[in-house]
């Protein structure tokens, strides 16, 4: 475990186990800190780990190199309601292949740069940049809608 790299990466509830660099970029191997999670079904804590599948997601560049995170997506078993639940990490959505901050960064840059330019800088396709932009736009509209609904109450 590297405390310095964990601090450098600055993502909540995970730590850096090890790190490697090759021609593709910088790879951080992460482990979640939690020993147990709250079951979304019944709200009880469970520490029975069912499986952990390692996934790879893109994160913000470091020193102009692409950064990839390898994180186990952990599934727990809840005895109370006999169901499996996936651990949630606030900095990513398991269905996306990027961290939220990576997607927000791309979204911001699309405002004053072309899709092709960002695609070149990040080493991804212009379609992927467009996909990220549209996803973040929809998400922030949803958030805005929720906070407006809250104000009217
Ligand atoms: Zn439960």
Image: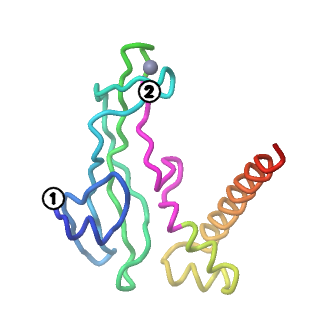
Q: Nearer the viewer, residue 61 or 25?
A: 61
Q: Quadrant of residue 10?
A: bottom left
Q: How is the image coloured?
A: rainbow
* Span of residues in magenta: 84-102
Say above or below: 60 vs 134. Answer: below
Q: Which residue is mark 1?
A: 1
Name the residue: 53% across, 47% down.
95
Q: Position of residue 47 (x, y in %)?
A: 29, 28
Magenta run includes residue 152: no
The answer to whether 43 appears left or right of 111 in the picture is left
Q: Secondary structure at mark 2?
A: loop
**CB of mark 2 near ligand 1 (< 8 Å):** yes
Per the image, the residue denoted by label 2 is 39
Towards the viewer: 119 or 146: 146
Furthest-left residue in view? 1
Q: Earlier in the sequence, mark 1 or mark 2?
A: 1
**Quarter holding the C terminus?**
top right
Q: Is residue 97 magenta?
A: yes
């Amino acid at each position: 475990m590297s405390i310095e790299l964990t601090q450098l990466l600055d993502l909540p509830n995970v730590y850096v186990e090890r790190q490697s660099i090759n021609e593709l970029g910088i790879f951080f191997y992460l482990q979640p800190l939690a020993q147990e999670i709250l079951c979304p079904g019944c709200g009880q804590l469970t520490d029975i780990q069912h499986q952990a599948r390692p996934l790879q997601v893109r994160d913000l560049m470091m020193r102009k190199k692409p950064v990839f995170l390898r994180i186990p997506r952990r599934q727990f078993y809840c005895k109370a309601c006999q169901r499996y639940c996936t651990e949630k990490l606030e900095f990513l959505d398991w269905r996306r292949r990027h961290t939220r901050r990576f997607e927000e960064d791309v979204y911001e840059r699309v405002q004053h740069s072309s899709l092709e330019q960002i695609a070149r800088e990040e080493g991804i396709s212009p379609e992927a940049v467009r996909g990220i932009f549209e996803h973040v736009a929809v998400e922030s509209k949803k958030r805005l809608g929720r906070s407006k609904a809250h104000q009217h109450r």
